[in-house]
Amino acid sequence: MWGGRFASGPDAIMEAINASIGFDKRLAAQDIEGSRAHAAMLAATGIVEGSDAEAIREGLLTVLSEIETGEFEFSAALEDIHMNVEARLSTLVGTSAGRLHTARSRNDQVALDFRMWVRDQCDALDEALVSLMQALLEQAEAGADWVMPGFTHLQTAQPVTWGHHMLAYVEMLSRDLSRCRDARKRMNECPLGAAALAGTSFPINRHMTAEALRFDRPTANSLDSVSDRDFALEFLSTASICAMHLSRLAEELVIWSSAQFRFVKLSDRFSTGSSIMPQKKNPDAAELIRAKIGRIFGANVALMTVMKGLALTYSKDMQEDKEQTFDAADNLMLALAAMDGMVRDMVPQQENLRAAAASGFSTATDLADWLVRVLGMPFREAHHVTGSLVAMAEAEGVDLPELTLAQMQSVNGEITEDVYTVLTVEASVASRMSYGGTAPEQVRNQIARWKDLLEVS
Ligand code: ARG
C-alpha cells in the first residue's frame, strides 16, 4: 500500500508485531458496511463516478460473502482487515477499487468499524440484561412472601423476603442497563470522514454516511474522531460493573447451594460432578461467572492504560484497543447467558429458607422495636434489654419466641403477652412496610412496577 515510499518490505518480527488481522477480522462486517456507505456517498457527491461506486459496492458484497463462508484468505502481510478487504476488492473489480479510499483514511475507518462493533455489543448487552431481569422477576414473583434470612457481614440480621432479595438484583441490573443505553447514546456519532486527522478537501457529505450507518449525527471534531476510544472504555466500565454484579449473585448461588445452606437447588444443566467424589454436585457455572470479572475489569484497566498520555491524534498504540474488548464482551455475554439459565432453572427451597430465617435470633430488632413502641422505652435501652433476652435464649438453647413470659419479665417486668405477636418471622417481614422495605405488600408493588417496565405479562 505504501510501495511508493519504501524500498524494502518489513522484517518478519515487524510483521508479527504490526499485524492486527488475527483479531480485527472480527470487524469485517462493520468494515464492509462502512465502505459501502462511503462509496455511495462518494457517488452521490460526484467525487467518484456512479459506475465505479456501484462496482465497488457490489464487489464488497462478494468479499463479505467470501468472508462469511470462510473461503476468504486473510493475509498478515496485508496487516489488518481494512487492507485485506481492499486488496481482495482490487482483484475482484480492478482499478476502480482504488477510488474507494478517496477522502478516507484507515484512521477514521478503524474508528468507525470499532465503534459500530461496540455499538452492536451494547445492543446485545441490552437484550441479555432485560432477559436476566425478567428471569429474576419471575423468581421474585413465585416467592414474593417467602421468608429467608437477610444478612449483614454474612451473619443473620433480619428476616427478609425471597422476592425482595431477587428484586435487589433486578435493581442493580437495571442500572447496568441504564449505563449501557446511556453509553450507546453517547457513542452514536459517526467518525467517518474525519480522514487521517484533519478532515478532507473533497466535498464529502458526512451527514449522509452518518445516517446510512444509523448514527444520530457525524462527530464534530476530526482530531477527536480518530483519537479517542472513550466509547469502548464506557462499554468496558459498564461491562465491569455488570460483571461485578453478576459475581455477587454467583457467589450467593455458590453459598446457597451448599449442603450447609440448602437455600436453592441448582439444575444439573448448570452443575458438574466430581471425578472422585460421587456425591458431589458442583456449581461450576456460578464459580466461573464469579471469576469473569477478572478479565473484564482487566480489559478496562488495560485500555485505560493504553490510552493514558497519548498525544493527539491517532497512534498505533490504539490498535491494542480491540483484542481485550472483544474478549471482555464475549465473556460478559457468556456469563449473562449462563446466569440467565441458572436463575431460570434454580429451585428455591422455601422450607429451608424459612427455617434459616427463624434461627439466629433474627427477630431481635422486632422485639426491641416493640419495647420502644409499646412500652415507650428509649431505643438504646430497648437494645440493651433485648440483648439480655438474646443472651438468656442462647444460654437456654432456645429461640426468642420460645422464652416464657416469666423469663421475659425477669429481665423487664413490663413486658406482656402481646410481645409474642412480633416475634414470628412472618410478622417481622410484614411489618417492614416502609417504601422499598421487605414486606410482601411492598415487594408485590415493586414486582408490578417492574413487570410494567419490562413488559412482562
Ligand atoms: N489496524 C489499525 C488499528 O487497528 C488500523 C489503523 C491504522 N492506521 C495507521 N495509520 N496505521 O488501529
Image (spheres, rainbow, N blue to C red):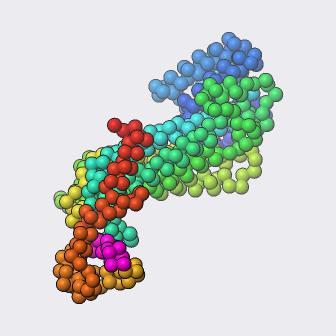
| Residue 9 visible to the viewer | no
Q: Position of residue 121 (x, y in %)?
A: 51, 40
For residue 195, which quarter of the picture? top right
x and y percent of residue 276 in the render? 21, 60
Q: Which residues are magenta?
A: 360-376
Q: Is residue 151 magenta?
A: no
Number of numbered tags placed on the structure image: 0
Q: In this rendering, does residue 332 appear at all? A: yes
| Residue at x-position 73% and y-position 42% | 224
| Residue found at x 27% / y 60% | 147
Q: Residue furthest bottom?
A: 410
Q: Residue at x 59, y 22 (%)?
A: 60
Q: Quadrant of residue 369?
A: bottom left
Name, please, the residue furthest toward the top. Answer: 51
In this view, 68 is above or below 24: above
Q: In front: 145, or 234?
A: 145
Looking at the image, the residue that sits furthest to the right is 201
Residue 375, magenta (yes or no): yes
* Residue shown at the point (52%, 40%) measured from the top left: 122
Q: Position of residue 406 (x, y in %)?
A: 18, 84
Q: Quadrant of the C terminus?
A: top left
**In terms of image quarters, where does ligand 1 lie?**
top right
Given residues 350 and 329, the one toward you in this image is 350
Q: Using the image, determine if residue 16 lies above or below residue 71.
A: below
To which quarter of the image does residue 340 belong? Answer: top left
Q: Quadrant of the N terminus?
A: top right
Position in image of residue 245 (x %, y %): 44, 55
Assign the magenta stretch its main secondary structure: helix
- In the image, residue 181 sits, relative to residue 28, either above or below, namely below
